[in-house]
Image (cartoon, rainbow, N blue to C red):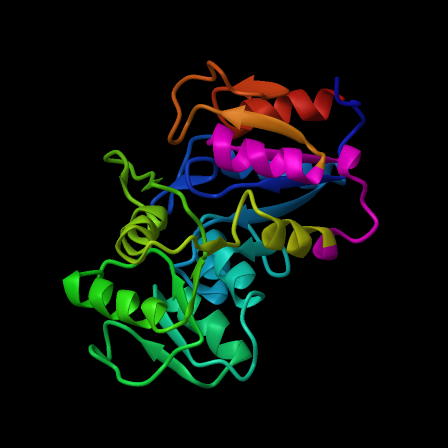
Amino acid sequence: MRKTVSPKVVLCDLDGVVWLAHQPISGSVGAIASLREAGIRVVFVTNNSFSTYDEQVAALALIGIPAEGDIVTSAMSAATAIKSDWRVLVCGGRGLIEEVSRITEDVVVAYNEPMATGNFDAVVVGFHREFNYQVLTDALTAVLGGAVLIGSNDDPTYPTPNGPIPGGGSILAAIEKASGMTPVVTGKPYGPMAKLVRDLCGNVTPEEMVMIGDRADTDGGFARRLGARFAMVLSGVMDTAVGADADIVADDLSAVAEILLKE
């Protein structure tokens, strides 16, 4: 049984926990404010690689949640897997493009430059709506030419108010299937994302962390990798906790916050 201590840091997923397509889930904004008022740091840990860091900060501010300095994205984790002298083909959104461009200047965006010539050192993949047969072909060509296949995350779906839509993991799976290459995945629940969180949280021990998420595999797996407790909410992708290795199960973030504040 995991040791239960009062949390110092709550690691909070965004999609399906705080909001659905940037529409706040009932009670989530107040729950975060209550946790912070009690002296608990709230860090947002999201596999969303599409939005830029500043866009995430601005979107949270619009619903009344300050977040500067308290966000870790899978785009940030993907950037840790590349080197400054690499030529990189990005099959992803603005956030992924921005983070990769912080590391190397030699970045080609697949859907902006179809049939780009020359060799690539890496193909970095995330959610994007421009994905098509040509992007798949160009990614396949680059990987078969020796490029490392990197996925910002492997989430198969993305929650929205109208139900799930295909996620970045579905795009990654298409490239993986076509190329036969196993990708390096960096977001939750994998090691590169965990390192970013540990670095951000400093001296806080795993026992003093709680991961709140809506996916038993992604968020629950991330909690286990960190050694933190896992609180599962039923407001996102999953509507049941059957089979989930969760320390806390609740309807939503507000209910989890209520439990944690009693500790």
* Camera-nearest residue between 63 and 219: 219
Q: In this view, does 227 lie to the left or right of 132?
A: right
Q: Can residue 34 be seen in this view?
A: no
Residue at 45%, 73% in the rendered image: 98
State left or right for residue 168 relative to residue 52. left
Residue 235 at x, y = what percent? 41, 27
Query: Dominant secondary structure of the magenta stretch?
Result: helix
Look at the image and say whether residue 78 sits in the magenta stretch.
no
Residue at x-position 33% and y-position 45%? 21
Q: Which of 97 and 225 is in front in this view?
A: 225
The x and y percentages for residue 47 are: 47, 49
Query: Is 199 drawn above or below residue 216 in the view shown?
Result: below
Q: Which residue is at 69% across, 25% downward?
A: 260
User: Quadrant of the rendered structure where residue 4 is?
Assistant: top right
**Between 243 and 258, which is closer to the camera in this rendering?**
243
Q: Where 197 sits versus 27, above or below? A: below
- Rendered residue at 57%/34% (across/down): 221
Q: Position of residue 203 (x, y in %)?
A: 84, 49
Residue at the left extreme, as displayed: 133
Q: What stretch is highlighted in magenta?
A: 199-226
For residue 209: magenta?
A: yes
Q: Which quadrant does the N terminus fall into?
A: top right
In the image, residue 75 sits, relative to residue 115, either above or below, namely above
Instruction: Confirm whether residue 23 shows in the render.
Output: yes
Q: Which of 21 and 28 is in front in this view?
A: 21
Quadrant showing the C terminus: top right
| Picture coordinates of residue 147, whole percent (x, y) | 41, 71
